[in-house]
Image: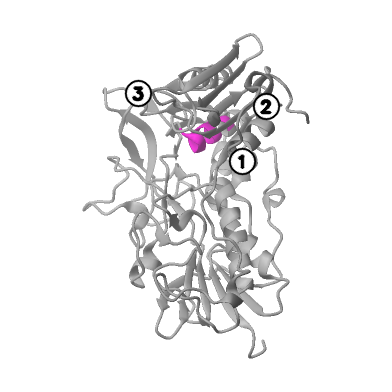
């Protein structure tokens, strides 16, 4: 490293951190070091459901390693902002000129009876304590590999997935493909409530039921039932007093037998390092339009970042933020701190600075591929629930298992949801992202968009 190079340290070896390292890799003015907590080769988390389903081998989900220094299996434990140094769990330190937090998010572990250690501490978060055997989150490659091993342990494994959002639906479909007997328990009125309206959710419900998945909506889970693992059972090493899940108790008193339980109850930004370092944290680590935290030498991107009051938790937003930050950092002279928010106005020399990050207009896509009826493709974007005065156009064909709905406000497309046939989604998404005035919406929703 030359004395003129800017030292950029990225905490997090996921999609956002590696994308940033890749974008900065060609700049001679920057030296990038990435600290990745997981020991695995970097991987695309979006593909974990395909790995669990057995459609992809784990190596297919691998991301290309950046030209930057990548330290795998190293966890950052403390940030010394005064000394501009990151302290790691192996005793090493990484000095930085610019620090980027790409720490991602953790799976939410709900407060269920049987999931908590004696004394009230959550089992998974207490040193030396673990979740009951057979209980898994679905967030990391380790989670995916553990679930794959569990479902391969014998025929007709009984699996209960708690949570009917995007993650829960993906996990349930993948387990069904592997031959498990799957029950999906969703507390809300319909599946994927954040993305789908009632009509689209009904089609999705029917598709999953055709795969053999038993679905319970408006279903609140109260707790887990467990049994002690006998000594010498061959169930693997572990501490004395190990427990294994045997079922799921619902609030109405009904009990679902279970060999494995998947917790797909959402994610929460990983903000512990930032909070301990004194950075501003709300739901996520608060950043401005240059993706700076309350310390201008520290940036945040991806699932851990909160921009303009919003935490996206989506791959598309993570990639856009990484690209935007790469443009900012590549244009920052080595060793020079960007101006603080509210500081002096930029000089004429910075007039050609990259445009600020103004947010991501996120499109959710999912392919559910299993069963004799073929795959079901899904896409949702923007505001799928209309406000008073909005116009709504729906096209539905139960025979072809297709559903299209768009919401129009004035002469602008503000949201939509499509299932089954997505040939028009690219044109619709372009119109929505560019906020174009609509001229022939019916043609746009029924045609292939000119592709």
Q: Residues within 10 Å of mark 3 (few under 14, many from 20)?
A: few
Residue receiving disc 3: 218
Q: Residue furthest front?
A: 348
State how far apart marks 3 and 2 are (Cα).
29 Å
Q: Secondary structure at mark 1?
A: helix
Residue 139 is situated, as x and y percent measured from the top left of the image, at 51, 48
Q: Residue at x 47, y 72 (%)?
A: 298
Please tell me in which quadrant of the rendered image residue 29 appears.
bottom right
Residue receiving disc 2: 422
Residue 279 is situated, as x and y percent measured from the top left of the image, at 36, 69
Q: Is residue 133 visible?
A: yes
Q: Residue at x 38, y 26 (%)?
A: 256
Asked whether, in this view, residue 176 is left or right of residue 90, the answer is right
Q: Earlier in the sequence, mark 1 or mark 2?
A: 2
Q: Residue furthest bottom?
A: 3
Q: In the rendered image of this protein, does residue 110 appear above or below residue 3? A: above
Q: Earlier in the sequence, mark 1 or mark 3?
A: 3
Residue receiving disc 1: 434
For the record, the magenta segment spans 165-173
């Amino acid at each position: 490293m030359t004395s003129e190079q800017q030292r950029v340290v990225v905490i997090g070896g996921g999609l956002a951190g590696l994308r940033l390292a890749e974008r900065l890799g060609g700049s001679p003015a920057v030296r990038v070091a990435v600290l990745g907590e997981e020991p695995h080769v970097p991987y695309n988390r979006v593909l974990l459901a395909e790995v669990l389903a057995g459609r992809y081998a784990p190596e297919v989900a691998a991301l290309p390693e950046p030209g930057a220094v990548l330290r795998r299996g190293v966890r950052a434990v403390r940030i010394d902002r005064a000394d501009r140094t990151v302290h790691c769990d192996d005793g090493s330190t990484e000095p930085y000129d610019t620090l980027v937090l790409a720490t991602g998010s953790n799976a939410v572990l709900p407060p269920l009876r049987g999931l908590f250690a004696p004394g009230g501490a959550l089992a998974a978060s207490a040193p030396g304590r673990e979740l009951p055997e057979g209980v898994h989150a679905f967030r990391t490659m380790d989670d995916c590999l553990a679930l794959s091993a569990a479902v391969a342990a014998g025929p007709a494994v009984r699996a209960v997935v708690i949570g009917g959002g995007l993650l829960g639906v993906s996990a349930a479909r993948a387990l069904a493909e592997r031959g498990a007997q799957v029950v999906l328990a969703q507390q809300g009125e319909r599946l994927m409530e954040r993305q789908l309206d009632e009509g689209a959710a009904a089609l999705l419900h029917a598709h999953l039921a055709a795969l053999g998945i038993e679905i319970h909506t408006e279903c609140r889970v109260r707790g887990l039932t467990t049994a002690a693992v006998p000594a010498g059972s061959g169930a693997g090493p572990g501490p004395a007093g190990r427990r294994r899940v045997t079922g799921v108790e619902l609030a109405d008193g009904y009990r679902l037998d279970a060999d494995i339980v998947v917790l797909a109850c959402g994610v929460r930004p990983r903000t512990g390092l930032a909070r301990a370092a004194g950075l501003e944290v709300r739901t996520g680590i608060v950043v401005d339009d240059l993706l700076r935290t309350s310390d201008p030498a520290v940036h945040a991107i991806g699932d851990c970042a909160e921009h303009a009051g919003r935490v996206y938790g989506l791959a598309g937003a993570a990639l856009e933020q990484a690209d935007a930050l790469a443009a900012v950092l590549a244009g920052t002279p080595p060793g020079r701190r960007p101006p603080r928010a509210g500081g002096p106005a930029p000089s004429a020399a910075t007039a050609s600075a990259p445009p600020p990050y103004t947010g991501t207009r996120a499109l959710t896509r999912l392919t559910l591929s299993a069963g004799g009826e073929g795959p079901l493709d899904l896409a949702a974007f923007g505001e799928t629930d209309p406000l008073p005065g909005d116009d709504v156009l729906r096209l539905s064909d139960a025979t072809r298992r297709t559903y299209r709905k768009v919401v129009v406000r004035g002469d602008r497309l503000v949201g939509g949801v499509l299932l089954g046939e997505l040939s028009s989604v690219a044109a619709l998404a372009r119109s929505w992202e560019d906020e174009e005035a609509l001229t022939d919406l019916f043609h746009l929703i029924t045609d292939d968009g000119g592709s």
